[in-house]
Every structure is written in C-alpha cells, then in structure tokens.
Image: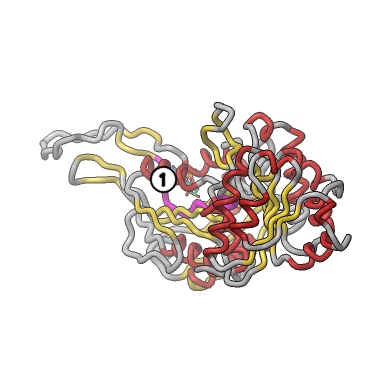
Amino acid sequence: MNFMAKKRILLGVSGGIAAYKSAELVRRLRTAGAVVRVVMTRSAKEFVTATTLHTLSGEPVWSDWSDDKSGMDHIELARWADRILIAPATADTLARIAHGRADDLLTAICLATEAPLAVAPAMNQAMWNNKATQANVDTLRERGVRVWGPATGEQACGETGPGRMLEPDALVQRLSDSFANGRLAGLKVVITAGPTREPVDPVRYLSNRSSGKMGYAIAQAAHEAGAQVELVSGPVALQAPDGVTLTRVESASDMFRAVMVCLEDCDLFIGAAAVADYRPVEPQARKIKKQAAELLLRLEPAPDILAAVAALKSRPVCIGFAAETENLQEYAQKKRMQKGVEMIVANRVGAGLGFETDDNELWLVWEGGSRWLPKAPKTRLACQLIEQIADLYLKQPSGLKAPEPHAKHSA
Ligand code: CTP
C-alpha cells in the first residue's frame, strides 16, 4: 500500500558517490505522491547539482547557511517535515548527527526537528565496519533514528561488503511503511513457517506435522502492525496473508538460501518453521525398490537456519521457536543460549497440542524476562507475541538482547 500521498519529506543528501541516486529517489518520491524538499551538504554538491534536485522536486533546494534567507529556514524546515530521510548518509554525517552537531544546515535541522528521522548509510565497507561508525549507529538507533541499510555488494571503490545505499525503490517503500498505522511501521520482518521436506528419493521425503498456522498468523500480525513482511514457507495448505511477500520452499537447504536472500536490510527474523534437523545423506535419483532385508537410511544434520542467521556479523534481532514435549522452560532457556537469539517462543507439542491445531499456549523468554501466553487461538497468540516483541524492541535501549557471546552489531 502507498501511504505517501501529500506527505512532506525532507530529503537530506550528504556527500558520497551514492548521491547520484538521490535524483532518482526524489523522482520516485514525487511519483508516489510526496512533496519533497532537499537539503544538501556542501560536499554533496560535488556529486549532484542543486539544479537537478530543484528541477525534479519542484521545490527550492537548501545547502549553505546563506540559503537560510530568513535566518529561520532551518527551524521552519524542521517543523515542516513529516519525515526526514538522509540518503545517502555518509560516515561523517552519521557521526555529526550522533554527536548533536549543528554546524551546517542539514545537521541543524536534524537537531531542531521532532519529525521521525531515518538514515540510509552509504560508505566504503571498512568505514561502515569501523567501531566508531558502529558506535555512532548504535547511538542513533538508541535515540529512535531508523537506520535503513546499508546493502551488501560491490562498491564504487571496487571493494565488496556492506556499505551500498539501499535502492531508491526500497527507500520509498520504507518511508511509505513508516506512515502505516502500527508499532512495527518502517521495519522489515522475515518469518519462516511450516515444515520442510527432505527428499529420500523422487517420491518420498522426511517431514513433520507442522501446519504453518502459527508462522502465517505471525506474518499477518506483523503486517497488521505496519511491518514489511517476507514469509518463507515450507509446503502448507495456507494462503499468504494479504500484503505479505511469500517465497515457497521445500527442503531445509532451500529455506536456508531463500532466507539469506530476504535478509538484506531486515530488522527482525522470526524462525517459526519446523525445519528438519536431519536429512538423508544421499537422496536417491531413482525410486527405492522394496526389498526383503531391512533398509538403513543414513541422515546428516540439515543447516540450522536460525543459528546461522544469529551468527551473522550484521544481523537482525532473532526470535526462535522451541517445540518441546517436556521440560519446556529449561529447554527453551538452553535453546536461547545455544542458538544465540534474543528471544525463544516455546510451546508444548504432542497429542492434541502444538502442530495441526488452531489453539496453542506459548512461553516467551528473553534476557531478563519471560511471559506465559495462555491457551488461545493461534491468531490471537500471534498478535500478543507481536505486541510483546514490539514492546521490547522499541524500548530505549532495546529490551531484546542476544546472550553473550552472541551480542550483536545489527545493520
Ligand atoms: N531451526 C532452524 N533450522 C533447523 C532447525 C531448527 O532454523 N535446521 C529453528 C526453528 O525454526 C526454531 C528453532 O530453530 O525457531 C528451534 O528448533 P528446534 O527444532 O526446536 O530445536 P533444535 O535446535 O532442533 O533442538 P531439538 O530438536 O533438539 O529440540
């Protein structure tokens, strides 16, 4: 959905090579219906001209203090904006905002505004990974600044890594989502759901009883809370909730690959899928024929998607599930530590419980807290879970922490 009609977007452009994309960004914002005013830093003018941005926005462009004709433009612009987005945001601009500097028009506006502020970092990967930049980004996040990106890939300097500015389309989507009415507005959530199928031969597979109902209900609840949701699902008989992007997969390896593709710029990862722990070592190319003797099937561990996401250097906040037949609380606590995730959502499985049912009960555990969600339909539990996640995630500083030594640097 497009929530951009008549929204007043102040676009800050700072001086990096990605500034050439800001012209396209202005065009896309206007196509989406927004009113766009641009404030450039002095060095941004080395990469893109004020005339270009003025022509595309149809509004004046500000840069130096000399453009602040009334002496109060910076205050008026700060009040005018519904949202401020700085794209590209260089390492220097991030540092100056983190330190509350007001030595140019753009940083002064950031200091004076009460509008939500988002930044789209763009810089060399070593500059992004530098502890100073990461500390500045952490500070900004703690103050509620939304950090969108950077993407990982080939860079203008010839290196490869995190530091590419998100594409204009993705930034327009983020801005649009941020106007949606909900607590997760502006956040991207990737969710896995359903079982996986591990092939034995062309006609047989190993799988489990997961119906996908819980994961799909969570996807719907996250979407209703305003998040951009990508659902990666094993084979289930369910329709994707409206507004949720669905990728269908079969095996644990397929799911692993699909999740890694979706993770770019992801804020929250929720692993609700019942992923196979083991898979046949050698799936047969031909159907296995019946024989008199016993048949031994050799299994090897399947990739652990949740643990792999949690181990990434640049990673979202991770929430895992634990389906247990006994010792629910003890196993859930252990699983949180082993997988290195911020929260575990535990439920009992067994006769009439958990899989294939419409009701469930959940026990949530995170660093410093836990909560029972008593038996209720999965759709209601999903909303309560998303509410709890939002409460903790949006707390300043965030109440969702990875256990040591998995403490994260999220991107
Ligand atoms: N998970 C995963 N990849 C796997 C196995 C599990 O991503 N190969 C995720 C599930 O989506 C869930 C969490 O890990 O969020 C817990 O899965 P579970 O199977 O309960 O835990 P295991 O680590 O497999 O432990 P055990 O089976 O011994 O209980």
Image x and y of residue 138, in percent: 74, 45
Q: Secondary structure at mark 1?
A: helix
Residue at 74% x, 58% y is: 395
Asked whether residue 319 appears in the rendered view, the answer is: no
Q: In percent of the image, x 42 and y 70: which residue is there?
A: 358
Q: Which residue is mark 1?
A: 258
Which residue is at the front of the view, 295 or 45?
45
Asked if the magenta segment contains residue 34, the reply would be no
Q: Is residue 305 above or below residue 34?
A: above
Q: Is residue 233 visible?
A: yes
Quadrant containing the C terminus is top right
Task: Name the residue nearer the viewer: 28 or 214.
Answer: 28
Q: Amino acid at mark 1?
A: Ala
In the displayed structure image, the side of residue 353 where residue 49 appears, left or right: right
Q: Is residue 245 left or right of residue 410?
A: left
Q: In the picture shown, does residue 277 fall above or below 346?
A: above
- Quarter of the image holding residue 92? top right
Q: Residue at x 84, y 45 (%)?
A: 99
Image x and y of residue 120, in percent: 64, 48
Q: How is the image coloured?
A: secondary structure
Q: Residue at x 34, y 44 (%)?
A: 251
Please state the horizontal and vertical placement of residue 43, each as a whole percent of the image. Answer: 73, 40
What number of labels is visible?
1
The chief SS type of the magenta part is: loop
Q: Is residue 268 magenta?
A: yes
Mark 1 burial class by Cα count in 10 Å: few <14, some 14-19, many 20+: some
- In the image, the segment drawn in magenta is 266-277
Q: Quick one: 403 or 12, which is closer to the camera? A: 12
Q: Please identify the quarter of the rendering in which residue 212 is found.
A: bottom left
Front residue of this view, candidates 112 and 353: 112
